[in-house]
Amino acid sequence: MKRRLALLFLLAVCCWTPAVWSQTGSGLFSTTLADQHGLTRNWFTQLPFNPYGDRIADVSLYVSRRQARCVHEVVLGDDRWIYTNQDLTPFQKPQGREEAKRKADEQFFQFQENKTVLLINPRKGENGSVMVVYDQAGEEKVRGVIHVVGTDDQLKTGRAALLQLVKEHQVEMIAVAHGDYGVQAARVMEDVLSNELAKNNVTLLKLVRHYEPEITLTALTERGTVVTVDAESGRVLWRRQVGSRDDPAAGVACTDDYTVAITGVRLYVMNRIDGKLLWTKKTTSHSFWKRPRDTIPSGSPAVSEDTVFLPSLNGRLQAFYLHDEERPPAIYVSPGRVLVKPTIGQVSIAWPSDYGRVYLSDINRPHLQGRLQAITDIVAPVAYLPPDKYVVGSLGGFVYCFYESGGQLVWRLSIGEAVTQTPILVGASAFVIGEDGGIYSIDINTGKKKWNSRGVRRFIGASTQRLYCLDLLNRLVILDQKSGTRLAVLPTNGVDYVYLNRETDRLYFGTKSGLLQCYRESELGYPLIHAGVSGQIKNDCDCEQKPTDPNEQAAPAGQPQQPQQPQQPQQPGGQNPFGGGQKPPAGQNPFGGQNPFGGGQKPAGQNPFGGQNPFGGGGNKAPAPDPGANPGANPFK
């Protein structure tokens, strides 16, 4: 009997253990539960380091300010064709923006061939879009204007005009080109097709162009391994070992050009693109009268475009210059110890000390601009909200907001519990999590509390309408951003590492052994950048160009076609970049008016410089014989 009981117990353990491991110890979030609550898994991966002998020490998410991917997307029903400037050619080189745009335009107009198409160009008009109907031969039949942005009367009138055109000309396809009102036009078309034209066999074709900044996720392990992955695909870009495996890892940070890692008492600067080690330097002082322990790193570094700011135990910030490794570091002095990562603003840098103060200094030189004195200690990094505000919480339960320029206090609010985490700034709201499990929404401009909720331990990320947090039982909590209402509570299946994402809407969590996963809301196929896309990326990307039809379209009906001028043979360089137009007749000044260099028409056979010929001979040279008059004559005699 005992043997049977032991055998049954052994079978139960063998059958039950894998199930428990798959549900509670895998570290992977359930995709079934995620789909039920509007979440989609972007990717999951195991970082390339030993998961049994190493752990994640620090993670840095970087949104590039200069590098971007220009995406051209052709959407027909549920099918999508995506062309980017980073797609590879047969020679394994990026095809570039012009080629990606050409392929997308060609695909967009290819779907319109042999169909009666209502083409909507949402680029023209103050708040309207030009509608053009083309027949199956590609000839224009009629055009009009539909308002997709404006008053209710304008929207109603434009909708009626659209329905009239579709029914009169038996339109088979509605094509929406990319433009300023492309999103609004597409929404109006989708609503029309699902309501008034639901019974008509009309398809919707869309051309969408947008730019997506390059986003990378860099992890530093306790053994000194640096791994960088693409934050949108999970693809490992590079991996490098820095320092000794026994050195403690302090932190990692990135810029557009560099990746900076701190292990032990050394600074390692690598190329962010390929991970090549550029240079390394000791962070301790070399002066014989200073103790090396005074400059031991005490937190993760903060990086601007050309400077690394490293906190130390003696209350100082060391500023190392990325472009000049031989230059001695600048010293930012403040009383007390700096134990957390500094925060970089537009023109300043802010950091708290264990004296309950926040110091504000110029980012380019060690010059203090202001100081905030809190009632109690501050143990969390300062949060920055562009363009000019800092927000920080204290152990006394107060939340402070002050300006970047001069440090003038904007408002102060007590939430009644200690604040040990960095406030999260999204839009016009600051979300603060207290030590006792409360989360508070505060208006960033007035400092008034909007709402509060209980049972939250840590923040993960935010979208346009939702907040994602962990509760006291390590479960995923979804909150409504406007009211704080709890929408859902989901188990996290053994997740023991969560990245606090202040930059985008993506959710990154997993295990400290290197198993990471990324989730997003199902409707947000492209990342939402909370701070906005940099102006340089907007200027560099050419995504705002209108589509180019590879086949030249006919002139509008009812308008006489202009007679074509005979084309002149072009030079290899193409058209004249200094102005078009016909070439003026021979003998006529092409600049118009009188000859700016003096004189009128050039006299035939007369020395244009006047006087005698400086090279000898008479003042006037005899006219040269015309070689065309006598073909046999030698023109050089």
Image (tube, helix red, strand yellow):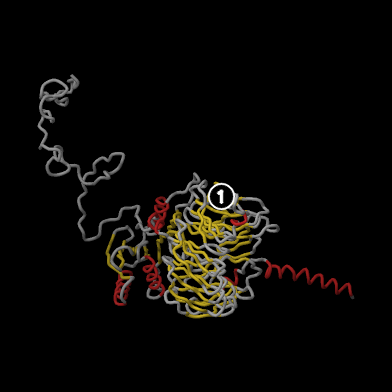
Q: Closest to the observer: 283 or 176?
A: 283
Q: Residues within 10 Å of mark 1 (few under 14, many from 20)?
A: some
Q: Closest to the observer: 476 or 375?
A: 375
> Would you say residue 494 is visible in this rendering?
yes
Furthest residue toward front: 289
Would you identify the image quadrant in which residue 353 lies? bottom right
Residue 258: x, y in percent? Answer: 51, 52
Exactly how many numbered labels are in the figure?
A: 1
Q: Closest to the observer: 492 or 379?
A: 379
Q: Identify the secondary structure beneath mark 1.
A: loop
Q: Quadrant of the C terminus?
A: top left
Q: Quadrant of the N terminus?
A: bottom right
Residue 380: x, y in percent? Answer: 55, 68
Q: Closest to the observer: 478 or 272?
A: 272
Inspect the image, locate mark 1, and give the three-letter code of the amino acid beneath it.
Gly
Q: Is residue 353 above or below residue 281?
A: below
Looking at the image, residue 473 sits to the left or right of residue 387; the answer is right
